Structure formats: C-alpha cells, structure tokens
Image (cartoon, rainbow, N blue to C red):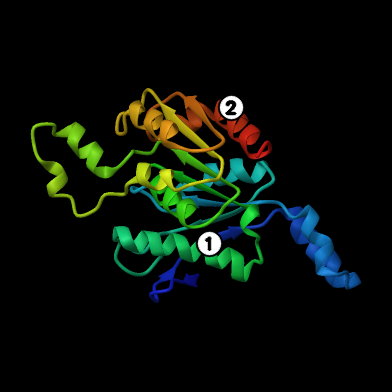
Amino acid sequence: FFVTSDGIKLNGWYIEQKEQIEQKEQIDKIEQKSSDIEESKPKTLIIFHGNGGNISYSLELIKLFYEMKLNIFTIDYRGYGNSAGFPTERGTYIDALASWDYLINEKNTKPEDIIIYGKSLGGSIAAYLAANRNPSALIIDSTFTSIKDIGSQLYPYLPVKKFFKFNYDTEKYLKSTTCPVIVIHSRDDEYIPFSHGLKLYETAKGHKCFLEIEGDHNSCFLKSIVTFKKGIKSFIYTN
C-alpha cells in the first residue's frame, strides 16, 4: 500500500524481475557500489486498468509484460479493489501521480526508465500522467478520445456534453505529451469505436505508431496476443 498527496491509501502490486532481485542480493553480499547496478536495471511499466476491473483483472497482462523483462507496478484507483476512498476523475489523476512518485522516491526508478500503459479508461489516466511527467514511453490500449465524445456518439440528438460531470479528455492530454506513443485498437471493439484510436494516433506528437489488433473490447488482448506482444516489444525496445 502507498498513500496519495491527499491522504488516500491505495493498493498496488510491485513485481520486480527475478534477475534484479538476485543482483541486489549479490550487491548486499559483496558491498558493491549501488551505481554499478543501474546499467542493467530493467525498465518499469505502470499499468492502469479499465473502469470495470481492478488489478487482479490484469494477471495475464502482467505475465506478458513480465516476460518482456519489465518490472511491473499496477494500482487500484481510489474506490477500486482494496484501495480506500471514492472514485472521481480528479482523484484518479492524483492516484496516477502518486504511483509515479512511489516509483521515483521508494523504488529509486529514473523517469527515463518508466513506461506508462493504460487500458480503456486507464489509457486516459495514463495519457494524463505522461502529459504531466516525462516517461520513457506511453502505451494507450482501446481508449476513447474523451467520455463526452463517446456520449455524443451514443446519443447524437441529445446535448449530453452538458450533463457529464467528468470527461477524461485523452486527446487533450496527448497534445501535451512529448514521449513516444503507441496506440492500440481493434475494429471489433463494441464499446469504443476504432475511430477513437485513429484520432488519438493522429493527435500524438513525435515518434508514434499504431497497432491494430482483433477481438472485442475485453478479449482483444488474448485474441491478438501474438500481434500484441510483438508490436509492443518492438516499440519498447526501439525507443
């Protein structure tokens, strides 16, 4: 558990590469300088899950990224899973910033060694964090341009934008993001249209790529696991 700037206790899992743990144990034994381990330290991936789940829903995803030789840090937003508090848009952003600070201050992770991943709603939170910090890269998976845009598409004849109390404006955050970005989306996504992924890709600045996968919103990762793994691995290790 760790605590946010506004005092909310959050649940998180930090999973280190086995080789890194063994290196630390060796250093403790031979009293080697800590700077000697930095060169071989793997990058760390922050995972932000979607609206309908918690960190336990990401086990297959965690396994896949761990196999890519990444340390993993995934959290439950306030009001989700075992985290305290009540979920709000502003609160989830504070939670994201707290996860970054935890890695920097408690795990001695450098900003250039942090990759941010977000699925669905988590993609918007990930984009917010990337816009306000300076990560190595950003991965946006099956994410909307904004909640209000989704509402307008579902109810085109109603002034829905006036009634939403939250927005999660992913497109806005991407405009302020300077790190490399990969956008992942499926044409079969029944919740978030493929056009949202294309728009986010168009909005992203600097080095970027688009990875098209297959399957519906919740199963696309497993259905396209080979394409997913190959595309992300190539993106991560060329940036």
Q: x and y percent of residue 37 in the render?
A: 81, 61
Q: Of the residues shown, which amino acid type is indicated by label 2?
A: Val
Using residue 109 as the reference point, say whether residue 34 is left or right of it.
right
Using residue 211 as the reference point, say whether residue 31 is left or right of it.
right
Query: Which residue is denoted by mark 1 in the rendering?
Result: 100
Query: Which residue is denoted by mark 2 in the rendering?
Result: 226
Say which residue appears at 48% left-offset and 66% top-offset.
98
Disc 2 residue crowd, few under 14, some 14–19, many 20+, Cα 10 Å: few
Residue closest to the eye, 73 or 128: 128
Q: What residue occupies the far right of the structure in this picture?
A: 30
Say which residue appears at 61% left-offset and 70% top-offset.
106
Q: In the figure, 99 relative to 127: above or below?
A: below
Disc 1 residue crowd, few under 14, some 14–19, many 20+, Cα 10 Å: many
Q: Is residue 81 visible?
A: no
Q: Is residue 59 visible?
A: yes
Task: Tell me the distance, in whole angstroms, between the alpha carbons under discs 1 and 2.
Answer: 29 Å
Image-quadrant location for residue 217: top left
Q: Of the residues shown, which amino acid type is indicated by label 1?
A: Trp
- Mark 1 or 2, nearer chain start: 1
Say which residue appears at 55% left-offset and 45% top-offset.
179
